[in-house]
């Protein structure tokens, strides 16, 4: 908590960035949950911790590189990486399938945002990914 307050003061008073408090909070809580998952072997804390940590880090990455238009792609990458890390740490096969499904939706979203595919092709990619995810869920 002390780190959180220090970072809020630095960003608020020195850098005049008043809306960063939420993403600093996400990084701090995410780091706390990652440590909690390491000590207590909680898969939910691992998933949510990695997700929050990556959401906060990717926001700052997109903000400083000035690619905020692509932040939805980084949100999906955060979910995909959270599932993949949870799979590697806790050997849950559904997270592996979920990570690949989200990865393909992320690629489709990226191509849609740079105007390489139409909305119908993007929706077809999402539909196919959801159908394959449902099939994988019932077959595991």
Image (spheres, grey):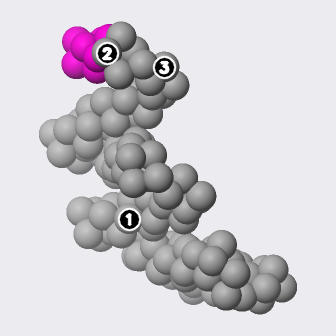
The nearer-to-camera label among 1 and 2 is 2
Q: Circle 2 is placed at which residue position?
A: 14
| Residue 9 covered by magenta stretch | yes
- Residue 89, image x, y percentages: 24, 63
Real-space CA distance between mark 1 and mark 3, rounded to the nearest whole angstrom: 29 Å
In what element is the residue under mark 3?
loop
Give the residues drawn in magenta, as a range.
Answer: 1-10
Check the image and report above or below for 137 versus 55.
below
- Residue 118, image x, y percentages: 79, 85
Q: Circle 1 is placed at which residue position?
A: 81
Q: Residue at x 48, y 19 (%)?
A: 18
The nearer-to-camera label among 2 and 3 is 2
Q: Circle 3 is placed at which residue position?
A: 18
Q: Which comes sooner in the sequence, label 1 or label 2?
A: 2
> Going by the image, does 50 lie left or right of 20?
left
> Going by the image, does 59 lie left or right of 126?
left
In what element is the residue under mark 1?
helix
Rate crowding at label 1 as few (under 14), some (14 to 19) or many (20 or more) other CA atoms within 10 Å.
Answer: many
- Residue 126, image x, y percentages: 71, 79
């Amino acid at each position: 908590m002390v780190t959180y307050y220090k970072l809020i003061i630095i960003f608020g008073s020195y850098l005049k960035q008043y809306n960063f408090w939420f993403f600093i909070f996400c990084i701090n809580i995410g780091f706390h949950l990652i440590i909690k998952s390491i000590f207590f072997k909680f898969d939910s804390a691992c998933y949510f911790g990695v997700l929050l940590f990556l959401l906060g880090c990717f926001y700052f990455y997109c903000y400083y590189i000035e690619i905020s238009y692509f932040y939805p792609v980084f949100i999906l990458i955060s979910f995909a990486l959270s599932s993949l890390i949870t799979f590697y740490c806790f050997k849950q096969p559904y997270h592996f399938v979920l990570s690949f499904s989200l990865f393909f939706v992320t690629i489709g979203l990226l191509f849609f945002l740079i105007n390489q595919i139409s909305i119908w092709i993007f929706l077809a990619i999402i539909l196919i990914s959801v159908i394959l995810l449902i099939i994988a869920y019932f077959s595991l």
